[in-house]
Image: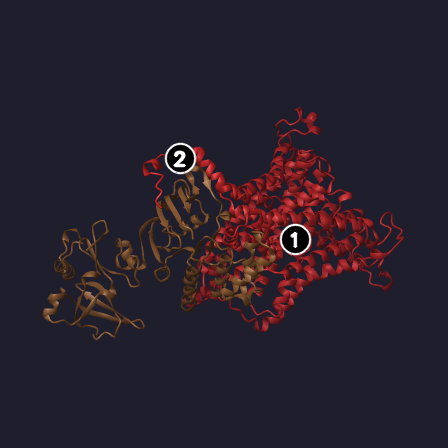
Amino acid sequence: MTQQTVLPEERAHPLSAWKRLSYLVRVKSADPTLLLALALLIVFGYLIFAPVVLLLVDAVTVHFADTARTRQDLGDLTFYYLNRVLLSPISRDLFWWPLAHTAIISAGAILLAFLVGAPIGWLLSRTDLMGKKWFSTALLVPYMLPSWTFALAWLTLFKNRTIGGLPGWMETLGFTPPDWLAYGALPIALILALHYAPFVILLFGNALKQFDTQLEDSARSLGASPLTVARRIILPLMMPSLVSAATLIFAKCLGDFGVAYVLGVPVGFDVLATSLFRAISTSQAGASAVLAGAIVLLGSLSIIIDMRLLKEARRFVTIGAKGAIAREAPLGKWQLPAVAWAFAVFLVSAGIPLAALLLTTVMHVPGSFSLDNFTLDYWIGTDLGTTALHQGILLTGEFWLALWNSVWMVGLAATGAGMLGLLVGYAVVRSPVRFVSVALRQITFLPYLVPGIAFAAAYLSMFAVPRPPLPALYGTPIILVLAILADQMPFASRAGISSMMQLGREPEEAGQIVGAGWFRRMRSIVLPIQRGALVSAILLPFISGIKGLSLVVVLAVPGTDLLTTYAIRLVDYGYSQAANAVVVMLCVVAFAGTMLVQKIGKANLSDGMGSK
Amino acid sequence: MSSIVLENIRKTYGRNAPPAIADLSMEIGSSEFLCLLGPSGCGKTTTLRMIAGLEHPTDGRILVDGKPIVSVADGLFTVPEKRNMGLVFQNYALWPHMTIRDNVAFGLTLRKMPAAERDATVDQVMTTLGIARYADRYPGQLSGGQQQRVALARMLALQPSVILLDEPLSNLDAKLRLEMRTELKRIHAEAGSTIVFVTHDQWEAMTLATTIAVMSEGELQQVGTPDDIYERPANRFVAEFVGNLPINIVERDDGRSDALHAWIDRCLTLFAVDGARVASAGIRPEALRFGSLSDEEVTRHAAGQGVIVDIVPTGGSWIVELDVAGHRVFAIATEHPQVTTGEQTHFWVERHHLHLFDRDKKRITL
């Protein structure tokens, strides 16, 4: 059978472009991966890229309300807002003081987080600390709960007469805390530090764990003193993980709205996030765009620095290489003090605040421990004689609505994010066109650079007016679902990409060989194999979304309240006990969810922290 | 049962990359058991995957039973789902979330075979391959050898017209290799299927295939029976690639004239070969004879002389290393060699065991 129909001379001529194209179309038609990737690119271009770009455009174009002031037409290019926020007389209150405050509390939070977290990271990774396993979960509890929960707890304990409402425990016990202890920079920094100390514990601890003790040993055997070893060997190798933890904490502090809102705003202590919130709630679209832009800029810078350092760190790891047996240093007589200290940190960062919150919800007057002061009214009472909220939380319709909203909106968003994340993973790993896959990966990572409150501002820019094919979405649940979904895409797509990388092509190719088309392969092979990854790609965004405040506080209205925004609304009204009760319920949901994820398996809390 | 023809296949990855396969044409006859043999990166797996449809050629045609399934010039490409070929992956690629039975039955389910008939087919295939008792387990619970049987069963259940295997024995231990070799031979004999497999392992190629196609750098070097390939290598590459212990090569053009070169010259004279064309000569270690000869025998065999440097037992045979004027020459003894290290010895070769190559490294037929 020799059918030499194509002679070599003929082959020298290039085939017509048309023929080649029709051949390639036929080859690719069996595999709609590229189409999928392009479709996803359009979806996320609309849901992530467009809002952020629009936000930046909003900062330099004239808004309807300001046409008279700027003497320009609607939509014209203007520096009015930049000037107003950065240079005008009110810029001090609008931007510069909040910026300084943000810098102070971030620096304070980073410093304190290191003082608390680094020793614990070492204790957990390199010593024979008693109850290590328990501590390694217990000390992460603060991160599983919303940061402003602890602000509420702080208020419960240290609130003084400067602001209205019920007294704090200290006040009741006969000691009036001074303002600097009750509000402002110190408590905010302290709470943020305790909340983000788990970053340090995990990142620093993991780095120490991977650190090859042979490096220490060889330095010691060459005659270096322990101090020299720590300074010249360990510290330089730990540097990337330390700086990485610091930049992450900075980025998080930047976008953290709740803590400063609870502890700063009542005494006029503004940070960038709260200043942005005020600008949004007073309808200064241009100014809020500039503020949000500034936050995005700072956030991106810190994350980019972090990514650089992580790359650097990876270079170090190759040196550390094999034989890394994490040797446990015996604590000996220091065992008890170490355990006591770790436990004290647990008490301060989780135990006492949670207990205080919980106790407040069953007390008429906070901090008064007489028996007749205890009550379940705030949970299940009726006819309480207050202006609003006449009954306990569990009997209040709004609470259940908020809970239901939280569950279905965040649930829907998380499910969407998880599924899309998996599809993104598939498209990124399999896309035949490299450019499309890179673009998709970058665009789904973008929200990570944009702190929650700025992302919410971006969503307002985008969806406060009709954007075909969608109508104006402000006030609807849809804007919340979309915003939460988009905000969770960085984690969801990372999870999707890494699980698809591990899958490899063969199982799918084997399906192809036995005759399964693309959709059948997705349904019967790819998705079932990735079931575990899908579960964690849904659950982790769910937990992170359900405790999130910064993003939704701007977008929720009373009808679309979530647990977080409902609790903040109660704080605003001065119903401390009810607010605390809501927060306790929120903690229960978030904590149960986290435990569930860890039980189910592979997903690890540290994965959600951007440590990889 | 089906014949396969590859016509002027070219494959490039990316516009500016050098072609993985420059211009490959070959025919695989119906019911042939063909091996694509070559070092890694020679394009053999790419060729296999192009036959299966998992890769597409940049140019050329592929025909099955005379009908083109791929023809770039005509814009024709049959998707792998529609080719009815069976492929067993190197790592088996069983679906981890399906039981063994479901793995085997999946293809039949896609073909909408009635349940009763499907179950009967699946049972029969699993029984033949001796995996029926694992039917309800998951792939992760089976050993490598069992997994391979499942992969074979999954492929055989569909009665493919062409069977493609990617390094079928490479992941198995020595005992299982023999077992699986028998199994594959049986499948070939019973079904009479056309089987194409790729490997870099010459043992795998020699023991399984009826025809071996040796490839290097995307080009076909030689197609022939295992004996052809081993005993009559078409060029230096094939001669050097095939063989457990590398073939001894004497370069006549390397500018030296020492005892080894002199020995080859005497051999050529003895065998009445025109030495002008011969650029190099090769002697397989097992063809190199050695021992003490009388003067008369030395002349008769054109024997050379060397020193025994090392004797390495390999279990059942011995590798004997000789030093000839600074060259290392290897011989294999199947009986315990009656020589000791440091001893002088004669060595010689029979005429039909001497491989000669010209300046283009092509074989010179004696």
| Image-quadrant location for residue A581 | bottom right
Q: Which chain wears brown?
A: B
Dot 2 surroundings within 10 Å: few (below 14), some, or many (20 or more)?
some
Q: Position of residue A195 (x, y in %)?
A: 65, 55
- Whichever of labels 1 and 2 marks the residue nearer the N terminus, that label is 2
Whether residue A588 sits left or right of residue A44 in the image: it is: right
Front-most of residues B40 and B184: B184
- Do labels 1 and 2 touch, CB within 8 Å? no
Chain where mark 1 sits: A
Vertical order, A116 against A69 (above or below): below
Q: Is residue A603 visible?
A: no
**Could you give the CA–CA distance between mark 1 and mark 2, rounded to whole angstroms?**
66 Å
User: Residue at 73% across / 36% down in the picture?
Assistant: A282
Front-most of residues A246 and B302: B302
User: Residue at 16% across / 59% down in the picture?
Assistant: B264
Chain where mark 2 sits: A
Q: Which amino acid is tagged 1? A: Leu
Q: Position of residue A82 (x, y in %)?
A: 62, 33
Q: Position of residue B352 (x, y in %)?
A: 20, 61
Q: Is residue B339 visible?
A: yes
Vertical order, A149 against A454 (above or below): below
Q: Which amino acid is tagged 2? A: Leu
Which circle, 1 or 2, is nearer the viewer? 2
Residue holding disc 2: A15
Q: What color does chain A have in the rendering?
A: red
Disc marking residue A192? 1
For the residue labelled by badge 2, is the local secondary structure a helix, a strand or a loop?
loop
Q: Position of residue A388 (x, y in %)?
A: 85, 47
